Image (tube, rainbow, N blue to C red):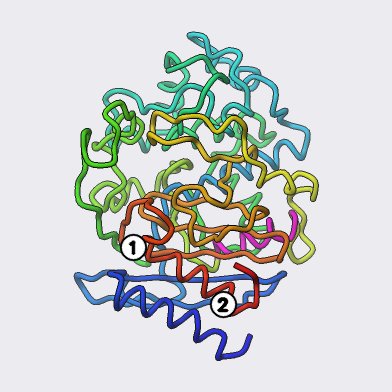
Amino acid sequence: MAASSKSIVQEAIDVAIGERGEIGIQVAAYLDSELVIDLWGGLADETTGWEVDGDTLFPVFSNIKAMTAVALHIQAERGLVDYYEPVAHYWPEFGKHGKDKGTVFDTLTHRIGVPLMPVGVTPELMCDWDWMVEQIADMHPLFEPGTRSGYMAYTFGWVVGEVVRRTDPKNRPFGKFIQEEICQPLGIDSLWAGIPPEVEPRVAKLTNLPPVGPGAPGIPPESLRFRASPPEVGTNQEVFGRSDVRRACIPGAQGIMNARSQARFYAMLANLGELDGIRLLSEDRVRTFNIPRPPCDYDPVHGVPHHGTIGGLHFAGSPGMGAMGNNPRAFGHNGAGGSLGWADPGNRLAVAVQHNRMVPHGPPEESPLTPIGTAVREALGIPH
């Protein structure tokens, strides 16, 4: 790509930092199977002056749900999981208290009835996989599985991950499954659900959102947000900056990666399941990942209609996905604080935009990252 085109994206990064309050940013994009944009700017830690580079790792929270969902799709591809079987078919203990009919598809689409974290959860307990899955299995569902939405801010990862683990002939820990079945085949070297200790010095420091609680502006009084992601394990530097949390596999809420690795993951999806001769998913399966899951009903966790796809991802127009643009064929995922990644199979485009200043999922025009997504498409000659 011409240097002048790259300068469009670098200018958007610099404006976001210089004029819109951003601290540190990475942007990466693949076109077909080629990394065509790999840019960054600003500070990984504003308290020390440590500058972002291409190897800086960012905590990107629910961005990891895309990789978690793809792990499940890989098991379906292999005939090891049927989306329409009950979760309890693979994980019998999950079937307690009326959850026995809740399906894998209900889980992918956040309709399984267990969006809330266990009572008494702490950062230490959240790091204990066995404790978490035992607690979730013993939960009474908030509603009859399959009848309504309830965004699984954290619990998505343990339910999906336990199904994958139980259907894995090697019975691997879920974080190892992601490494061996997604990252290693695709040559992705900096994407984890649970980092190895040696990479921790590369992880950027978060700048938190101002504290909010029940009754805050924009949060409906009936919102379950603070039970789905309790303050004790909130998406902030104090919790997710802890070494034990960073190293634990929390595959619904704790992804740590750099932009080029996230973009390479989405390049596989943008190329309909294949990258550089390595096929993880069939074209037909990936073609379904942008289809909205009907009905788009009210989600008591977010306090807005649920905007998920049948593949466990987000489509254009979903809250927090403004940088992805309006292409109805595109799909991706974001996370608390605003980082996001997406695939656009129609244009064979994959993009990741990551940062360390936590911002709310407001309208697209308010996001400091929306102009960066626009700049990427302009630089590559792709319609907005």
Q: Position of residue 171 (x, y in %)?
A: 62, 34
> Around disc 1, counting alpha carbons within 10 Å, would you say few (fewer than 14), some (14 to 19), or many (20 or more)?
many
Q: Amino acid at mark 1?
A: Asn
Instruction: Using the image, determine if residue 235 lies above or below residue 354.
Output: above
The quarter in which the C terminus is drawn is bottom right
Q: Position of residue 181 (x, y in %)?
A: 66, 49
Instruction: Using the image, determine if residue 149 lies above or below residue 140.
Output: below
Q: As rendered, which of 296 and 331 lies closer to the eye?
A: 296
SS under mark 1: loop
Q: Position of residue 18 (x, y in %)?
A: 30, 78
Q: As rendered, which of 374 and 88 lies closer to the eye?
A: 374
Q: Is residue 268 magenta?
A: yes
The quarter in which the N terminus is drawn is bottom right
The residue lying at 53 percent from left, 58 percent from top is 341
Part of the protein shown in magenta = 261-272
In which image quadrant can residue 174 be found?
A: top right
SS under mark 2: strand
The residue lying at 28 percent from left, 41 percent from top is 218
Instruction: Using the image, determine if residue 273 lies above or below residue 25.
Output: above
Q: Amino acid at mark 2?
A: Ile
Tag of residue 37: 2
Q: Position of residue 10 (x, y in %)?
A: 45, 81
Instruction: Name the magenta segment's main secondary structure.
Output: helix
| Residue tagged 1 | 356
